[in-house]
Amino acid sequence: MIWLLLGSGKIIKISVVTATCNCISTVEDCLDSVAHQTYLDREHVVIDGASRDGTVDLLQSHRNQLAVLVSEPDRGIYDALNKGIARASGDVVGFLHADDLYAHPDVLAHIAAVFETDPSVSAVYGDLQYVRRENTAEVVRDWKSAPYSKKRLAWGWMPPHPTLYVRREWYERIGGLDISYRIAADYYSVLQLFIQPAFRPTYLPEVLVKMRLGGASNRSVKAILLKSREDWVALHRSGVGAFGGVGALMWKNLSKISQFK
């Protein structure tokens, strides 16, 4: 296995956390995407929010490929992801949402190779494509990220969160995801992590995840407005943002326009 030969000798275990709730139409693609990854030192942790549409039965039918399966009421997706982090046993934690899938079978292998090659790396992230719900081969928006810099972060940049894989100890340091946010806890966690002096993220310049359109943050005008308000709060709480956060919030939204096909 090439990625093992390139590494430092320590094999990295990756925990993939998926939160599910009434998503029977898409979750099997997510499960299959993880199952077909060539990197074998991984575990799939699934936290279900007491689904009632048959999702739990479908998950049970795949039980042999899941390290953890929990189904119980929760306080939303971020609460579920925190439960997943708490139950994860991997060195590195990443999230694959129920509507999403990996761009190719070697995604986790490529991520692991970066961590194994340089033990000082705190996180790895890459590029993301938004795709049609009914046809995941049709790309609607191409989110190409970039190497991290403090200046980019101050102007509203963030890595595509579904591509972000972080050493588990860092989530423990920040106390997981803040569930007081309904939509922007992922952005706030990125700000919390990336402003840490010892945090060292690395950009992997390739598409890692395909995300179906219609997620919580972009499914309606109301959701977009809520996301902007919560982004503003996150910027102020973290002390990040050009021109008091105004420049960051404006550029964060305007920069998305060029990503559309």
Image (cartoon, grey):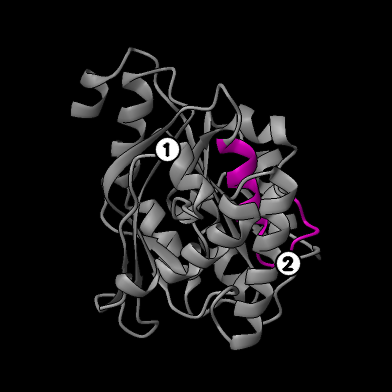
Which residue lies most toward the front here? 243
Please say if 198 is above or below 214.
Answer: above
Q: Which residues are magenta?
A: 178-194
Badge 2 marks a residue whose secondary structure is loop
Front position in the image: 143 or 168: 143
Label 1 CA crowd tier, 10 Å (few <14, some 14–19, many 20+): few
For residue 9, say whether it is visible. yes
Left or right placement of residue 92 versus residue 211 in this view: right
The residue under label 2 is 182
Image quadrant occupied by the C terminus: bottom left
Image height check: is 73 above or below 213? above
Q: Earlier in the sequence, mark 2 or mark 1?
A: 1
x then y, percent, for residue 19: 62, 60
Q: Nearer the viewer, residue 52 or 115?
A: 115
Q: Are marks 2 and 1 in contact (CB under 8 Å)?
A: no
* Amino acid type, mark 1: Ser
Above or below, comparing residue 168 to residue 26 in the picture: above
- Residue placed under numbered mark 1 in the picture: 149
Q: Nearer the viewer, residue 198 or 4?
A: 198
- Locate residue 165, reporting x and y percent: 47, 41
